[in-house]
């Protein structure tokens, strides 16, 4: 059982880190603001979710586990809203000269 | 193996802090430098966590990175119309040399002082920990801030009031005592409204949690006040509430109430315990909680008003 949880932690945290890396590569390589935001939000939300999932078995209590889940949910809400605002600002301003 | 990993992480973190700091100093655009400063603050938060100082980490994240970063971004937005002109104005070679020399000598002085500290460094940690039971608190940092060195905390809260007066005094005569910030709902968008409606209740609960656990665990009024201030600014910017005119009596009373209660309890100490800010035997914890409870709304309102800026329009 402990081994299975350890494997879950390693796999989930590693894949989470991979998604963060993919999102960052997209952020650096994509041609315009909207697709850069797209790369960041999708990959980072998934990455954060996977890392949270991997850390859950190590939280050491229901309270700490709930805090981890709350961190993920709050980061998602804030990230989604801020990205919408940035994207609107980018669309209104148009492409940089 | 774990030690080597931790060491590699610490070195990487330190390198990253230095790189972000250098980039922030060298970048020419004010808004970009402000964003760099926020990133630098978040990295410093991680450094404080690695040094096992969660109280400092929380304050760095909330005040150092959060509130200060917001203030800098606001300043950058205000400076935008004049930024091109300011950048075109290159100071002379001699001037730049003198500035570089002064900055370098300050850095060298600080670095030298840290390198010359005796090993082990002088510390009062043992005495502070030994005196902890007398305060009735479980968190040594709170005990230092509100018992052993409470005069510093008192002065800090008064300095915040002075800063607020400084910001207000930037208001032009015709809007003196008016409402700070842009017109109601100037940034209004349904996304921001949604975020404010979802986040504000969460923020208030988290702030109260930080405030309450501050006696025994990392947290306290300053971090809680920063979160409350952020929530208030968020609902203002979303157009859900308007910013209050700064001439309102209730507003000014809330802002001064915290320092006034702190001072009053300080003078009470002169009368009952023989020294300014001393707590009578056995009453340390209730008095500390009273000070914290009085300071929380004052600090939250003062920080929010600092971020909101000088009055910009009449009622």
Image (tube, rainbow, N blue to C red):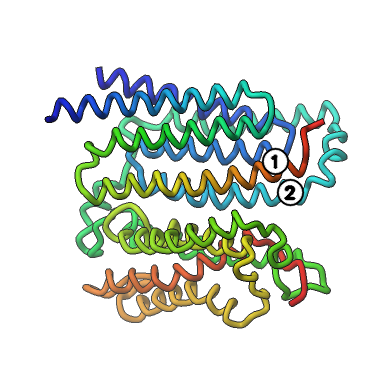
Task: State which quarter of the image contains the N terminus of chain B.
Answer: top left
Residue B149 seen by the camera = no
Discs 1 and 2 carry the same chain letter:
yes
Residue B122 screen position, x and y as percent: 33, 39
Residue B112 as seen in the image, left or right of residue B311: left
Count residues near mark 1 (Cα–Cα under 10 Å), then give few for <14, some for 14-19, many for 20+: some
Q: Nearer the viewer, residue B197 or B275?
A: B197
Mark 2 belongs to which subunit? Answer: B
Give the class, few, some or many, for how many residues have Cα within 10 Å of label 2's Cα (few <14, many ≥20): few
Mark earlier in primary sequence (1, 2) = 1
Q: Which residue is mark 1?
A: B31
Query: Which chain letter matches label 1?
Result: B
Q: Position of residue B239 (x, y in %)?
A: 64, 65
| Residue with the most extreme left position | A1
Q: Is residue B45 above or below residue B214?
A: above
Q: Eyeballing the image, is B16 above or below B46?
A: above
Q: Give the CA separation, mark 1 to mark 2.
A: 7 Å
Q: Splitting the image into 4 quarters, where does residue B288 fall? A: bottom left
User: Going 78% across and 29% down the picture, which residue do you hit?
Assistant: B96
> What x and y, as percent, mark residue B230?
53, 58
Report the side of B3 relative to B258 (left or right): left
Look at mark 2 in the image and give the residue it sits on. Answer: B77
The image quadrant that residue A40 belongs to is top right
Is label 1 in contact with label 2 (beta carbons under 8 Å)? yes
Quadrant the C terminus of chain B occupies? bottom right
Q: Secondary structure at mark 1?
A: helix
In which image quadrant can residue B149 be found? bottom left
User: What residue sits 32% from the left and 24% below the top?
Assistant: B6
| Image location (x, y in percent) of residue B229 | 53, 62
> Element under label 2?
helix
């Amino acid at each position: 059982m402990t081994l299975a949880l350890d494997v879950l932690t390693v796999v989930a945290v590693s894949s989470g880190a991979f998604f963060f890396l993919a999102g960052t590569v997209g952020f650096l390589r994509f041609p315009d603001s909207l697709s850069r935001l797209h790369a960041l939000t999708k990959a980072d939300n998934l990455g954060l979710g996977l890392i949270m999932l991997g850390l859950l078995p190590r939280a050491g209590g229901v309270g700490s586990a709930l805090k981890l889940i709350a961190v993920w949910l709050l980061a998602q809400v804030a990230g989604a809203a801020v990205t919408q605002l940035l994207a609107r600002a980018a669309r209104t301003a148009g492409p940089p000269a | 193996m774990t030690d080597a990993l931790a060491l590699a992480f610490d070195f990487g973190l330190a390198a990253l802090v230095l790189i972000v700091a250098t980039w922030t100093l060298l970048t020419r655009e004010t808004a970009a430098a402000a964003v760099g400063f926020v990133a630098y603050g978040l990295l410093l938060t991680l450094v404080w966590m690695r040094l096992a100082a969660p109280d400092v980490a929380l304050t760095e994240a909330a005040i150092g990175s959060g509130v200060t970063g917001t203030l800098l971004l606001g300043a950058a937005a205000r400076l935008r119309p004049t930024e091109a002109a300011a950048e075109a104005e290159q100071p002379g070679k001699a001037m730049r040399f003198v500035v570089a020399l002064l900055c370098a000598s300050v850095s060298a002085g600080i670095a030298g002082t840290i390198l010359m500290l005796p090993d082990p460094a002088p510390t009062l940690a043992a005495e502070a920990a030994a005196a902890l039971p007398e305060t009735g608190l479980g968190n040594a940092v709170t005990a230092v801030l509100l018992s052993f060195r409470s005069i510093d905390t008192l002065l800090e809260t008064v300095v915040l009031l002075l800063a607020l007066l400084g910001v207000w005094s930037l208001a032009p005569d015709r809007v003196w005592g008016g409402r700070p910030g842009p017109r109601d709902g100037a940034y209004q968008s349904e996304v921001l409204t949604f975020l404010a409606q979802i986040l504000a209740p969460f923020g208030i609960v988290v702030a109260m949690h930080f405030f309450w656990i501050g006696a025994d665990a990392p947290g306290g009024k300053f971090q809680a006040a920063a979160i409350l201030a952020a929530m208030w600014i968020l609902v203002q910017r979303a157009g859900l509430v308007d910013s209050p005119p700064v001439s309102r009596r209730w507003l000014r009373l809330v802002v001064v109430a915290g320092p006034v209660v702190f001072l009053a309890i300080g003078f009470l100490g002169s009368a009952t315990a023989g020294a300014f800010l001393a707590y009578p035997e056995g009453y340390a914890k209730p008095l500390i909680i009273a000070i914290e409870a009085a300071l929380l709304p004052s600090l939250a309102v003062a920080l929010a008003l600092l971020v909101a800026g000088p009055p910009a329009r009449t009622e």
